[in-house]
């Protein structure tokens, strides 16, 4: 799978457990696979984020239409105050995202890039990622297909917030990250630290 969507549910306070139960019970939509489910811990709070992979563009669009027309995402609509859905294509040099046990937290970073800079970004990441992932794994990096463009999402798991801080600082100090020639092409940066739901395939 190289096509993904990230569904961000803003949920009512105190409903995380009910939302998780509904997401787990809803199962996989046709042509899709649940890969991750997290709740936000640092950043914008009160969010549940769901990452899914799709076998084809038709499957992705079909599921988007179904969710919009039914108006009850994952069967927990009564707990939801806002829904945002973003579609992504995996950076072509990366392997498909697979379920795995990585650590206690996940950082989801979204970067905006200058126009005509996306291919450059993919190229410099391809050069830099092999050495960077010797320090800690990269779940995936993918560019957005809709919404404010161009932008891309990258997902990094860590054992803890402290480990994240240490690894990132060492990578910068050693000159292996960020990718050389990459930051000058960025326009915006957002980061959310998330914790996996108990049933999340990525945990």
Image (cartoon, rainbow, N blue to C red):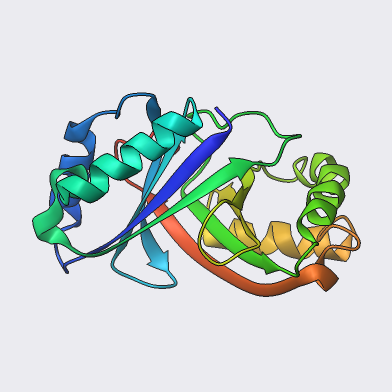
- Asked if residue 180 is positioned above or below residue 127 in the image, the reply reads below
Name which residue lies at 17% across and 33% down. Answer: 25
Q: Residue furthest left?
A: 78
Reply above or below: 164 against 155.
Answer: below
Query: In which image quadrant can residue 178 be found?
Result: bottom right
Quadrant of the drawing holding the N terminus: top right
- Measured from the top left, where is residue 120 in percent x and y? 85, 55
> What residue sits 85% from the left and 47% below the top?
123
In this view of the protein, which residue sits in the foreground, 126 or 40?
Answer: 126
| Residue 191 picture location, percent across and down | 55, 67
Which of the image's four quarters has the C terminus? top left
Left or right: 120, with 140 as reference point: right
Q: Is residue 118 above or below residue 3?
A: below
**Disc count in the image?**
0
Q: Residue at x 58, y 50 (%)?
A: 155
> In which quadrant of the rendered view does residue 20 lie?
top left
| Image-quadrant location for residue 184 | bottom right
Q: Is residue 35 visible?
A: no
Q: Answer whether residue 33 is visible to the viewer in this image.
A: yes
Relative image position of residue 90 (x, y in whole percent): 63, 40
Q: What residue sits 25% from the left and 45% below the top?
A: 67
- Asked whether 14 or 117 is in front, the reply is 117
The one nearer the camera, 138 or 150, is: 150
In the rendered structure, the answer to whether residue 11 lies left or right of residue 79 reads right
């Amino acid at each position: 799978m190289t096509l993904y969507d990230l569904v961000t549910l803003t949920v009512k306070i105190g409903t995380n457990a009910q939302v998780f139960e509904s997401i787990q019970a809803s199962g996989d939509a046709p042509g899709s696979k649940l890969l991750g489910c997290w709740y936000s811990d640092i950043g914008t709070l009160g969010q549940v984020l769901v990452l899914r992979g799709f076998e084809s563009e038709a499957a992705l669009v079909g599921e988007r239409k179904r969710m919009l027309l039914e108006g009850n995402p994952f069967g927990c609509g009564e707990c939801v105050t806002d829904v945002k859905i973003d579609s992504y294509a995996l950076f072509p040099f990366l392997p498909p995202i697979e379920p795995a046990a990585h650590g206690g937290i996940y950082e989801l970073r979204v970067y905006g890039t200058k126009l005509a800079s996306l291919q450059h970004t993919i190229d410099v990441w391809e050069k830099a990622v092999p050495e960077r992932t010797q320090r800690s794994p990269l779940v995936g990096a993918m560019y957005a297909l809709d919404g404010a463009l161009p932008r891309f999402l990258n997902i990094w798991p860590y054992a803890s917030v402290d480990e994240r801080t240490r690894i990132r600082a060492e990578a910068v100090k050693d000159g292996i990250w960020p990718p050389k020639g990459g930051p000058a092409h960025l326009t915006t940066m957002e980061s959310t630290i998330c914790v996996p739901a108990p049933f999340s395939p990525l945990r």
